[in-house]
Image: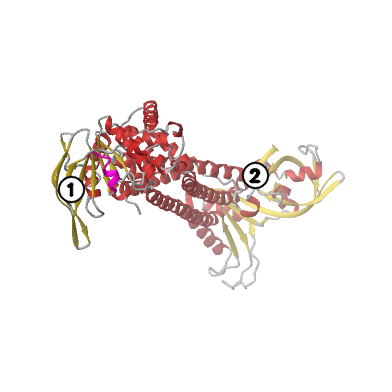
């Protein structure tokens, strides 16, 4: 069945019927090409979502104080809620089982000077654990440590762009900068994938910030890093418990929606992952629709091919072709075309995705579109197999045609 | 070589059935050149198709070279056709995208003859019909007479026991017809058994025996003195 002669016969037939070969091949190539491109774009969208959320750790809750909008337990409405150091300790004590680290945030804008250079930057008073919540990457030097917090040292960690702004090409480590009137020593330079804004920030110990501000114990925000094992439901439960705890502690009406805000990154992540998943599902459905359209295309062409060749099949049968010969000739031709053009379409598709790379990430939210070789090959093989089946049905019918019927002149 | 006994065949035409062959009996020995004549509708083509295993009889016996032909599966019929029979059709039935040589070599392909041998044989038979120089031309580049000669070469290539020709000159002018008949006579001279279906008297008289069919029965079966077609060919 697979002798060299059979192949030669197939090649000859395909070469001599160029238009037919081209049309069926083109359908298959196009089907696979569209499938791969669509599927790859879908993956690119998901990559974009992932990138948005990979900048920060996802096992994090942000607590922001607000203003009360309802009176409660003798307190008037429109009261400003504030966090303080004792709140941090309470979380660590009461939620010890769930929480890895609690870090405060005190954001202040400050004029920063080094020699002749000066500029306004956001300084952020943080705890040493904040490095993990922000996924801050140190380029050189070190991050704030526990000693810095406890001893209220005047050490600062500056962003990559702050170093470039103030020090040019010089090395900032070990230099002293004037930070809103106080002198700080630069102990580290960080980079952040969050973009330029995040790289124009300066981290200092929150204890030092409180000391500068007349030894206050107020805290602007609280960042709670919980144990990743909690998962999505655990994180949602923790969010509810924290809310109840603080509403109780700060005498806030349980119904009050303006006094306390909690941003749950896990929840947002899950929503976005669900969204991306739904998107991927749609893309997959459309892509497989394309494959099915391709299969239908091949079926149509095969029906046409067999019809067009009825007479030829009759001639072949009259001079001694068995039904098996007829089926295998038509089937091998069909499988051969689908295989060659299917894999051609696949390679073009993969090449197209490769060449797109990150060109679409700016405007279309498609980052690094790709398709795994497994999926690409699977789709191609599916098309080939069904193309074969699509060819087999009319081929079998053709093989059953009596030569006398096929040869009858119209 | 060929023996048929009490052959019947009818076709269903909607609710009626058309009785085409109503008990045909005849024998043809090896080396005969038989013309089957009759007006259209007399059943001559049906008879030829049954002899060629392209169609099946309803009842009756058909013995070809000592083998009873009955209850054939498609595959077996194809093998017998390939082994025993060569066909020549009125409309030539060459495969239009294959060259003359490839067309002639095709029956040998289905006999699983090697390619070199196929080509050598195809060229040999093309040479016998005088078309060796046209071996690499497509049918569309050949005249009607040339096409029929290629078809005859193809029928001969498998070296069949019997050559069946269905109106081989039906689509040709008389000069070309005589050339083709000359070729058929030459092949017969080498000992091949040939059956020719025709409705043309002059063509029939170039055979050695004429069978007349009318309304599905043989009305006349006579041996004749053969007219050599070469007399008319320049």
Give a yes or no on whether discs 2 and 1 share a subunit.
no
Q: Which residues are magenta?
A: B200-208
Image x and y of residue A175, in percent:
79, 39
Q: Nearer the viewer, mark 2 or mark 1?
A: 1
Pointer 1 residue: B57
Crowdedness near tag 2: few (<14), some (14–19) or many (≥20) residues, C-alpha within 10 Å: many
Image x and y of residue A335, in percent:
41, 41
Image x and y of residue B230, in percent:
34, 36
Secondary element under disc 1, as helix, strand or loop, is loop
Determine the residue positioned at 25% across, 53% down: B39
Pointer 2 residue: A136
Residue A231 is left or right of residue B8, and the answer is right
Residue B190 is left or right of residue B91, and the answer is left
Q: Nearer the viewer, residue A55 or B145?
A: B145
| Quadrant into which the N terminus of chain A falls | top left
Give the spatial CA distance, label 2 vs label 1: 91 Å
Secondary element under disc 2, as helix, strand or loop, is loop
């Amino acid at each position: 069945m697979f002798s060299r002669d059979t192949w030669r016969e197939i090649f000859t037939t395909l070469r001599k019927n160029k238009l037919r070969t081209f049309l069926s091949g083109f359908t298959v190539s196009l089907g696979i090409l569209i499938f791969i491109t669509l599927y790859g774009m879908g993956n690119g969208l998901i990559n974009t979502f992932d990138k948005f959320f990979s900048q920060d750790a996802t096992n994090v809750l942000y607590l922001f104080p607000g203003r009360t909008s309802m009176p409660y337990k003798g307190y008037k409405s429109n009261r400003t809620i504030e966090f303080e150091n004792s709140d941090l300790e309470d979380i660590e004590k009461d939620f010890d089982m769930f929480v890895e680290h609690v870090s405060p945030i005190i954001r202040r804008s400050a004029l920063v000077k080094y020699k002749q250079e000066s500029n306004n930057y956001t300084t952020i008073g943080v705890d040493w654990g904040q490095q993990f919540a922000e996924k801050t990457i140190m380029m050189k030097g070190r991050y704030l440590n526990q000693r810095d917090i406890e001893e209220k040292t005047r050490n600062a960690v500056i962003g990559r762009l702050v170093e470039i702004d103030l020090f040019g090409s010089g090395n900032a480590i070990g230099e002293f900068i004037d930070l809103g009137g106080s002198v700080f020593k630069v102990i580290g330079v960080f980079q952040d994938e969050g973009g330029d804004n995040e790289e124009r920030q300066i981290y200092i110990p929150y204890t030092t910030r409180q000391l500068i501000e007349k030894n206050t114990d107020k805290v602007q925000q609280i960042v709670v890093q919980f144990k990743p094992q909690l998962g999505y439901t655990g994180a949602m439960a923790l969010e509810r418990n924290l809310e109840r705890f603080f509403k109780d502690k700060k005498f806030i009406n349980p119904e009050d929606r303006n006094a306390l805000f909690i941003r749950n990154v896990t929840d947002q992540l899950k929503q976005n992952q669900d969204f991306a998943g739904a998107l991927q599902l749609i893309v997959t459905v459309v892509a497989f629709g394309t494959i099915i359209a391709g299969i239908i295309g091949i079926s149509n062409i095969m029906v046409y091919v067999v019809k067009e060749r009825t007479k030829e099949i009759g001639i072949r049968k009259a001079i001694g072709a068995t039904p098996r010969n007829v089926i295998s000739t038509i089937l091998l031709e069909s499988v051969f075309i689908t295989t060659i053009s299917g894999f051609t379409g696949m390679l073009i598709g993969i090449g197209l995705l490769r060449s797109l790379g990150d060109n679409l990430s700016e405007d279309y939210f498609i980052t690094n579109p790709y398709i795994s070789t497994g999926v690409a090959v699977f789709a191609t093989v599916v098309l080939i197999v069904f193309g074969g089946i699509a060819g087999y049905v009319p081929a079998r019918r053709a093989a059953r045609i009596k030569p006398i019927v096929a040869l009858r002149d119209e | 070589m060929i023996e048929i006994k009490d052959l019947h065949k009818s076709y269903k035409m909607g609710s009626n059935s058309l009785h085409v062959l109503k008990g045909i009996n005849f024998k043809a020995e090896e080396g005969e050149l038989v013309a089957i004549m009759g007006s259209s509708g007399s059943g001559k083509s049906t008879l030829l198709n049954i002899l060629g295993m392209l169609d099946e009889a309803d009842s009756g016996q058909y013995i070809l070279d000592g083998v009873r032909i009955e209850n054939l599966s498609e595959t077996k019929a194809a093998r017998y056709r390939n082994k025993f029979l060569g066909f020549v059709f009125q409309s030539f039935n060459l495969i239009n995208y294959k060259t003359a040589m490839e067309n002639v070599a095709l029956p040998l392909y289905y006999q699983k003859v090697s390619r070199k041998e196929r080509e050598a044989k195809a060229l040999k038979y093309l040479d016998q019909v005088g078309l060796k120089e046209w071996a690499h031309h497509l049918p569309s580049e050949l005249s009607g007479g040339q096409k029929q000669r290629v078809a005859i070469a193809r029928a001969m290539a498998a070296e069949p026991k019997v050559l069946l020709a269905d109106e081989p000159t039906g689509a040709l002018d008389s000069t070309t017809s005589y050339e083709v008949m000359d070729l058929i006579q030459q092949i017969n001279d080498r000992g091949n058994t040939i059956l020719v279906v025709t409705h043309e008297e002059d063509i029939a008289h170039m055979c050695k025996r004429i069978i007349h069919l009318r309304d599905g029965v043989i009305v006349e079966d006579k041996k004749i003195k053969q007219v050599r077609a070469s007399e008319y060919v320049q």
